[in-house]
Image (cartoon, rainbow, N blue to C red):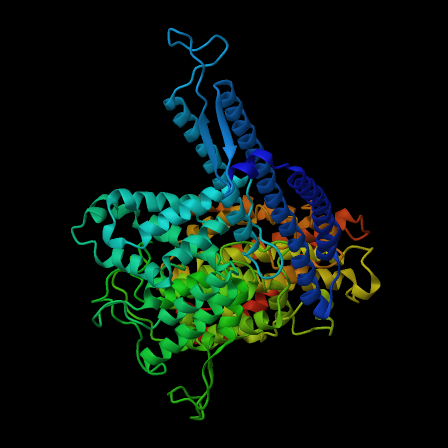
Amino acid sequence: MNFTALHNTGFELLDLAVGDWNKAVGNLERLERDARTGLRDKANAANWMGVNATVSRQFIGKTAGEFADAHTQATSIRNILRDTCDELKTCQRTLKEVVERCRAKNITVAPTAVGGFTVTRIATPADRSGAAAPGSPANTPDETIAFRDEIQAVLNKATEIDDSAARVLKALVAQTDHGFSDAAYIDRDAGANALKAADRLAEIARNPERLTPERFAALNAGLKRYAEDELFAERFATAVGPKGMVELWAGLATDHRAGDVWRAHRDDYDDLQKHLSLTLATATQSDTPAMGRWKDDMIELGGQRLGGGLASPTGFQVMSNLMRFGNYDDKFLTDYGTALMAEERRHSDNGRQTAFNWAHVTPVLNYTGTDSGVDPLTGYLQGLSASPAAATEFFGDTFLTGTDDHGFKDKSGNKVELSNFDYLFEERRWPMDHSAKDTPGGRDALALALEAATTGHPAGEMPTVDTPPHTDQQTDLMQKLVASISDDPKRLTDHMQMADSIGQIASEYLPDINRAASNDTFGNSDKLFPITGSTAHLSHADVTRFLVTLGQSPEANAAIQVGQAAYTGYLMERHLDPNLPEDLRYPHPPEDIVELISRRAAEVDGALAIGQQEAVLGPAGKEVQDFQNSIAQQKNAWSGAVGTGVGVGVSFVATPLVGALVGGAAGTVSSLVLEHVFQQAGTNALQDAAKSSSYSWEESLEESTARSKLAAEKAAEKYDTNYQHQVGDWASTGAKDGFNDASSNSSRMADDLTTEVAGT
């Protein structure tokens, strides 16, 4: 910033720009509100069918999100411009005040031709004694120098303000090739400080050999503060570079022997790993050219060893451990996964042997406490669990074709094609990991990734009304998962750490499961169990074996039981509503409706009860109390879903019933049923604590019957039907038949169970 520009410039144009952006922010705020309430909410409440249920509805949701991002970005730009304008005006006022003080001291300040300035002392007249003449201010050479330095400091500050504003604005706009960034900054300083911090911390990360306990602490604290700041993350990642990033983490993992950093911060390695992961995840969302090169170069490093021997980790092994936290860019995850699976084929000889089985020589690369990090699939799958779209695509990709050189064959001896799901869930020889504490991290990460891939939302979360209904790709994967576990239940029972995630998957596919169990009794199961979006076409026998197997896990059993209870409430409330449009009505009398809904609910509960029996009385030796406690714990997960209809998956909620449910209306039949479920579970848990590991088929039947009766009675009462006093009997009949169905269908699993099938 030169002297003349700061001293003489007017700020009319900048003031005008700030005013224009103020108007833009106001307009975009209204558009965002209209898009959210008038576009997105109406789309969520509409009765979408066919392609519209997924493609159109999802497009509307993304469009509404773009308005929100546009409002955020416009607000950030306005804030930065306004702050910059105010700060430059302050600098101008300060400069003019200094010039006036110079003039008062008989010191002149003049601009030069090249944008600089001069500060010149004017000699003051003196009287005969040598003192300054009356009325002539005295000045000294030191004062002249001081004024010069003061003016230069003002110009330096103005320059820094102007330059940093330009850097922040350019970086902000560069974040996305298309659309808008959701990076939010309250003023210029916020953005400028983020970029400065990125440069400062990148210098530490680029020089691991100079790492001290103090520099480690600074790096960890800085990443913790700025991990989700988009400008910081992009600048930090690109400044360190892909090779610098993996060398940093590999160096910390391998060179800590007796080091000062290890001694001072060994308990902070997990924090640094998490904050690096979150920062890189944020960075990959950036579309800058530099970040594009970073992604490509990181994948290129994947198969390269970072040291001189076979014990040295590869780029994939290191980077995958920095993917366990945060939401990575979908395309980067997809490209990374494609390259990683190619490396898997190479190291495993197309699945003939174990890949990455170097735990005895490779150092620990993961400090989260689940596994050593030697298997790059583990960290990568954990990363996928936060990115549903990338996870769905990954599991559907081909791992081996029928013409590749491999040994996987069908019953006729013909080589088969394996998808990534087929290979990882059924065929892969997972490496031994002697550092794993309680459960092998790889299988758990696989289940988490499958949860995201089949449900359409990050693992560990409940669906919301904004979660799109299931797509063809998701339901195809669900079909494979159910069939695979049915074909060989040991694929799950030998690795029960996966059951909680798969139980959550099942709870969100209860409409599909109930429809499969109905055997289309009257030819209208699509209306009795309506599904928006794609349907998973499941075999009744497969569903039974799937549920019995999952029922052996307290967590999975609880997720499905609670989901089925809520779903039963939704169905009763929907089908007993006299105002349901004729074209959506199940064309049979209320008695048939109540009996069939109760029968299917009881069949699900009965299959789970058989699984529980196997877990309690079989080799696993589970306690009945474990199952009751797991049901009680579901209350926290359902706290935001009760009354919204989304707990059993969004493929059900986009019906006329959703108008009341999206707002979280209290007093819905489902919320009343769940209140009963959780209260009963708490009571049972206290009672079962004093019992031995006994099991009662009759108790399970009674509880399932009570749920269906309550749902039917509350729905009939709500609509003031003339059969209010009959629905309880109808529900009881249906529940009894459903438990008999579960017993009969499960008898085919005798070879897979060590206890006698209940009820037979």
Q: Nearer the viewer, residue 51 or 148?
A: 148
Where does the image place residue 333, in percent across and percent down from the top left?
47, 66
Among the 4 quarters of the image, the one containing residue 358: bottom left
Q: Nearer the viewer, residue 471 or 622?
A: 471
- Above or below for 170 versus 356: above
Residue in the picture at 61% in, 65% down: 738
Tell which residue pokes out farthest to the front in this image: 128
- Is residue 160 visible to us here? yes
Q: How many marks?
A: 0
Q: Is residue 110 above or below residue 616?
A: above
Between residues 406 and 579, which one lies in front from this camera angle?
406
Q: Is residue 694 visible?
A: no
Left or right, 592 with reference to 197: right
Seen in the picture, residue 447 relative to 133 is either above or below; the reply is below
Q: Is residue 651 left or right of residue 581?
A: left
The residue sitting at 45% across, 52% down in the picture is 233
